[in-house]
Amino acid sequence: MAQDTRPEPPGAVSVWILAARPKTLWASISPVVIGIAMAFGDGGFHAPAALVALACSVLIQIATNFANDLFDFEKGADTEARQGPLRVTQAGLATPGMMKRGILVVLTLTLLGGLYLIWRGGWPAALIGVFSVTCGMLYTGGPRPLGYLGLGDLFVLVFFGPVAVAGTYYVQALSVSGTVIVAGLAPGLLSVAILAVNNLRDADEDRRTGKRTLAVRFGPGFARVEYIIAVVVACLLPLLLYLATGQHPYSVAAVAVVVVALPAFRRLFWVEGPLLNPVLAYTARLLLLYSAVFSIGWVL
């Protein structure tokens, strides 16, 4: 009798971990770390608020990833030709009903943490939370999804950048400054770079399924230039902040991350399709490195 050599399907826990896309969660962790470091460096650190803000930020991204998995499947944007990581709904590892229940559970947990942040920070914290969750669901959901209209880059820039950094700072210090908002542009831009690689890799499939990302609208050359500009501007921001304020000089060390990005710049112009996946992972590590160097420099 022939032996069944088919791989065992992943267990229930593994399926939810796959759907959460843990390798992408640095996009929600990094700006919160920067917001915590800036509050600490400015004397406004508040540990409970910082930890809850971190938890809520990660939960909102997980809910958004679940929704993306579900809605892309329902709209036919995820097919067997997909070149990126596995999507559990498209792969048949989870039903749409399961994903909907998963989204509800994660958003309920987010609400529990959000109630504390609203109690501490008042209506601005409530506004940030509601707006973030709503846009996360509308990224691939609803009749006119943001990601399908080419607005995904703007969403990522705003919510994984100034909103996350300034929101984290605010619920600790109960105030916010222009410096914090500008500093928040850097993780937002690096997250835009991650999205640019993702959209460049998936451009052919997105074009066939009607997903009008910027890489589809303006071509692969645009996506590559967008990536380089996003990374370079992000890395220059600490220097600009120091020149403008004369404070936190050690944070300027984050400028050196642009040197670490050079291998990604080169590879970006030589490969396409699934061969871009290493560039995607490398850019996520650049975001992590930038956040660590800037944060340490800010508190020194």
Image: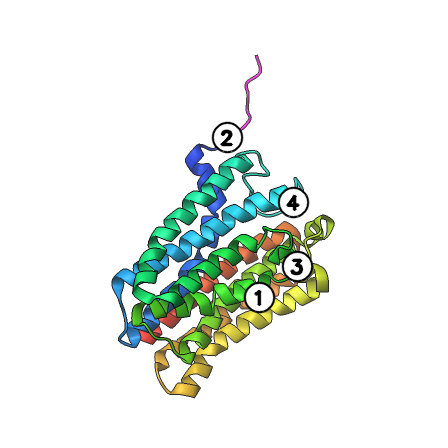
Asked if labels 2 and 4 touch by Cβ distance under 8 angstroms, the answer is no
Query: What is the x, y in percent for residue 141?
Result: 58, 50
Asked if labels 1 and 3 touch by Cβ distance under 8 angstroms, the answer is no
Amino acid type at mark 1: Leu
* Residue 283 can be seen in this image: yes
Q: Which mark identifies residue 9?
A: 2
Query: Which residue has dot 1 on it?
Result: 154
Q: How many other residues sit within 10 Å of disc 4, few (<14), some (14-19) or many (≥20)?
A: few
Which residue appears at 30% of the width and 77% of the height? 42
- Looking at the rendering, which quadrant does residue 88 occupy? top right
Spatial CA span between label 2 and label 3: 35 Å
Query: Which residue has dot 3 on it?
Result: 149
Spatial CA span between label 1 and label 2: 37 Å
Mark in front: 1 vs 2:
1
Labels 1 and 4: the sequence-earlier one: 4
Which residue appears at 65% of the width and 46% of the height? 77
Asked if labels 4 and 1 touch by Cβ distance under 8 angstroms, the answer is no
Q: How many other residues sit within 10 Å of disc 1, few (<14), some (14-19) or many (≥20)?
A: some
Which residue appears at 51% of the width and 56% of the height? 134
Query: Looking at the picture, does residue 212 appear above or below residue 238?
Result: above
Is label 2 in a helix, a strand or a loop? loop
Is label 4 in a helix, a strand or a loop? loop
Considering the image in quadrants, where does the N terminus appear? top right
Labels 4 and 3: the sequence-earlier one: 4
Query: Looking at the picture, does residue 86 appear above or below residue 30?
Result: above
Considering the image in quadrants, where does the C terminus appear? bottom left
Q: Which mark identifies residue 126?
A: none
Could you say which is closer to the camera, residue 155 or residue 204? Answer: 155
Amino acid type at mark 2: Pro
Q: Which residues are magenta?
A: 1-7
